[in-house]
Image (cartoon, rainbow, N blue to C red):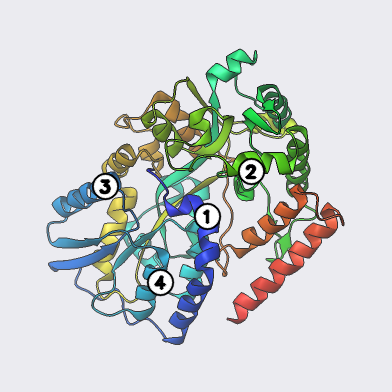
Amino acid sequence: MPPAPPHRRAFAALAAVGTALALALSATACTGAPRGGADDDPGARTTITFWHPWSAPSEVRAIDADIARFEKAHPRIKVDVVGGIDDDKLNQALRGGGSRSPDVVTSFETANVGRFCSSGALADLAPFIEKSGLDLAKTFPKPLLDYTQFQGVRCTMPLLTDAYGLYYNKDAFKAAGIDGPPVTWSEFRADAKALTKPRGDGYDQVGFLPNYHGYENNIEHYLGSWGPRYFDSHGKAFLALDPAVGELMFFQQKMVRELGGYEKLERFRTGLGDEFGAEHPFQTGQVAMQMDGEWRLGMAMDAKVPFEIGVAPMPVPDEDRLDYGKGFLSGTVMGVSAHSRKQNAAWELVEFLTTDTEAVVAFANDIRNVPSTFAALKSPDLKLDPRFRTFLDIARHKRSNTAPGTLDGGAYLRTLQDFAYRFEKEKDTRGLIPGLLRTERQIDADMAQAERG
């Protein structure tokens, strides 16, 4: 995807909008049952309104082209398109309904699906899916089906995918005598140390910037290599006894120490260029390895970096070599407003954009994202750099995973991340397990509050 799509910054952005979002969706519940329904004439000529968050010119051209394909295939349905809509505006409209509210919406915030589904802001798509005869399990990879539903209610469909992998500077690897990308985290740590070039109180180059404040170093992105549970079978937070969480916490803390310590790395980090600008530290050569989404390849190529770029899956724990190739997945979601009085026509647009292979492939080609259906992932019409295949393989990998949605919009991840910040700084002297137990209690309390409304 092009620069700064909100879902890449999901939880930083959610921290800012979370309160407003909660109020909006709570208010939705207070308005009573949505007044929409699927009772519109499926054969009628009509116009529907579609809101989306894309704003960059190349993105807008791409989605407009997809809408044109839909209108050509469905000449009785016209689509009024409104772009640049963030989740604040989206939720205000979903709450209020009315003639000017959208019939179809998209969001970059997969963490909000739990709220969308549980509040009734978006329509349950199950009746439409059944009527269309869609076999979701044969159409989409499982992680995408997981993050587009909540507790059995499917109120969204996946529209393209974000897959996280490892970018590495091949020239720096060659200079350090490293033959290829690391497969395990032990190999990764050794490579990061070999690639790091300290200079005084700073660095000429860091092999990898491990700090959680580093670009895309969200804890759930790291944990994609381990595959944590997050919650037990009763819906309670499950962190302290999950080996995946503890192993990551200790591994990351050790890497911070070995690469110079938290304070020194933070000073280096705060002097780096913008994540979505040409001065991104991987693109400038200041960082030799970077965990990032598929969009980074196109951005680095556009920046004309003066070195050869390598792309690989993120490493896996040493004992899980056979799982190499998996990664963390996220993406854009699409649904029908529960207030819409044209839900049959709205569903036709959702079904077309999310499952029509030609449409999915064309959109993926245009904005350099990972397509979201099995058919599109193997389409010969994909026009992508050969290195992009790594992300297609991550999307198809049976052990790739995502973070589950919750009623409170993924607040548990922010709570866990807050503890991770303290742990990497070694400021929380009470230890990992006591810290994770406190984190669990806080998450469970927040979830109980969300359930009470």
Mark 1 Cα within 10 Å, few/some/many (few <14, many 20+)?
some
Looking at the picture, which amino acid does disc 4 mark? Asn
Q: Are marks 2 and 1 in contact (CB under 8 Å)?
A: no
Residue drawn at x 43%, y 80% as measured from the top left: 28
Label drawn at residue 146: 1
Mark 4 Cα within 10 Å, few/some/many (few <14, many 20+)?
many
Position of 108 relative to 302 (above/below): below
* Mark pair 2, 1: CA separation: 19 Å
Label drawn at residue 206: none
Depth check, mark 3 against mark 2: the one in front is: 3
* Mark pair 1, 4: CA separation: 22 Å
Query: Which is nearer the N-term, disc 2 or disc 1?
Result: 1
* Mark pair 3, 2: CA separation: 32 Å
* Mark pair 3, 4: CA separation: 24 Å
Residue drawn at x 26%, y 41% as measured from the top left: 358
Q: Is residue 150 visible?
A: no
Query: Which is nearer the N-term, disc 4 or disc 2?
Result: 4
Residue drawn at x 71%, y 34% as measured from the top left: 317
Query: Which is nearer the N-term, disc 1 or disc 3?
Result: 3
Decide which of 93, 31 is in the foreground and name it. 93
* Mark pair 1, 3: CA separation: 31 Å
**Which residue was labeled with disc 3?**
57
Looking at the picture, which amino acid does disc 3 mark? Pro
Q: Which corner quadrant holds the C terminus? A: bottom right
**Which residue was labeled with disc 2?**
222
**Looking at the picture, how far across and down is residue 88, in whole percent?**
41, 69
Label drawn at residue 91: 4
Query: Which is nearer the N-term, disc 3 or disc 4?
Result: 3
Query: Which is nearer the N-term, disc 1 or disc 4?
Result: 4
Q: Is residue 373 left or right of residue 437?
A: left
Q: Secondary structure at mark 3?
A: helix
Q: Are marks 3 and 4 in contact (CB under 8 Å)?
A: no
